[in-house]
Image (tube, helix red, strand yellow):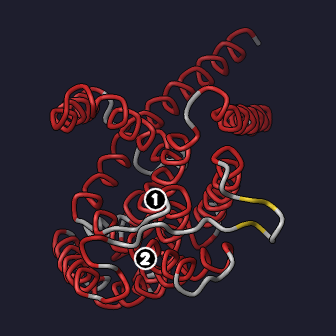
Amino acid sequence: MTTMTETFLTINRVRIVVLLALAMAVPFVTYPVLGMTVLCFGLFACSFNLLLGYTGLLSFGHATFLGTAAYVTAHALKAWELPTLPSLALGAGAAALLGAVFGLIAIRRHGIYFAMVTLALAQMMFFVFLKAPFTGGEDGLQGVPRGSLFGLIDLSDDTTLYYVVLAIVVFGLWVIHRAIHSPFGEVLKAIRENEARVTSLGYDVARYKLLAFVLSAGLAGLAGATKVLVFKFATLADVHWHVSGEVVLMTLLGGVGTVIGPMLGAGVVVVLQNELADKVGSFVTIIIGVIFILCVLIFRRGIAGELNELRRRVLGDARSGSADGG
């Protein structure tokens, strides 16, 4: 058993090193903005997965947190002329605060009722941003400056910005990893499996759900704030309901309840949209839909889930072979 555990940990470490190496090589093989787009939406999907995959809460309004942070960060950089890092923190904090408000309203609902409440709240915020004077209405906030990092690193260069975005996303993934592998995360998984049982054990389920919701909203906000640096604008598209639908697709496609799966799902969706949009136009949504249907029918665990299952089978066969040989 000890040998198997050590093997599992070694494989995980190797996988992390390989993924980081591949991520760092992206600017040399493709357009850096495409890589940054994948990273931002990957973090967004991973934050959503913290709710759906580990807590069992399906939110249909998660784009609100992405868009709220985008607007706040853009306004802080352009109108208030704040430094880049404080602007990012302000955007993520605003999303977390809004998540606390949403959570207090929605977490006592269950199933489809929870999803519909989050969708209704998100639609309400969409019209708030449409009419609010600081958002620019339908035009949004354009020409947002990227600024610099610590006054030393100029972020106007796409390649330089890519590595800053990569560092931010790695930090976000580390936070998620620490959360789900802590006692807090174990309680969240128990709530997902049997909420009544967790309540009977004396845990304050509503409090844990609220904390998960706020953490998820804050990380989604961090993704939205970072996205502003990449594209230098914030628009109503960031808070539209279809973005909330896309993040569900990314998460299911990549693998619900896996740490890196939503990142893979985001990569597939973003790359397909980028590569096929000019060639097939609006039909790209149909193609993505067909891929999603095939994934659900054939690879029900998602991309990462199926890879994890394959790894377990290989390690299980290896252990069986060692036992037989012994």
Callout 2: 10 Å neighbours few (<14), some, many (20+)? many
Q: Nearer the viewer, residue 119 or 323?
A: 119
Callout 1: 10 Å neighbours few (<14), some, many (20+)? many
Q: Is residue 57 above or below residue 120?
A: above
Q: Amino acid at mark 1?
A: Phe
Horizontal side of 24 relative to 112 (left or right) equals: right
Q: Nearer the viewer, mark 2 or mark 1?
A: 2
Label drawn at residue 13: none
**Quadrant (top left, top right, bottom left, bottom right) of the C terminus:** top right
Q: Residue, x 48% and y 36% (percent of image)?
A: 304
Residue 138 horizontal/vertical position (percent): 24, 72
Q: Is residue 77 above or below residue 300?
A: below
Q: Nearer the viewer, residue 150 or 91?
A: 150
Q: Are marks 2 and 1 in contact (CB under 8 Å)?
A: no
Residue 198 horizontal/vertical position (percent): 43, 76
Horizontal side of 138 relative to 303 (left or right) equals: left
Helix, strand or loop at mark 2: helix
Name the image quarter holding residue 106.
Answer: bottom left
Name the image quarter holding residue 243.
Answer: bottom left
Residue annotated with mark 2: 71
Looking at the image, tell me whether mark 2 or mark 1 is earlier in sequence order.
1
Q: Spot the residue most to the top.
A: 325
Helix, strand or loop at mark 1: helix
Q: Amino acid at mark 2?
A: Tyr
Q: Residue, x 59% and y 24% (percent of image)?
A: 316
Name the image quarter holding residue 291.
Answer: top left
Residue annotated with mark 1: 44
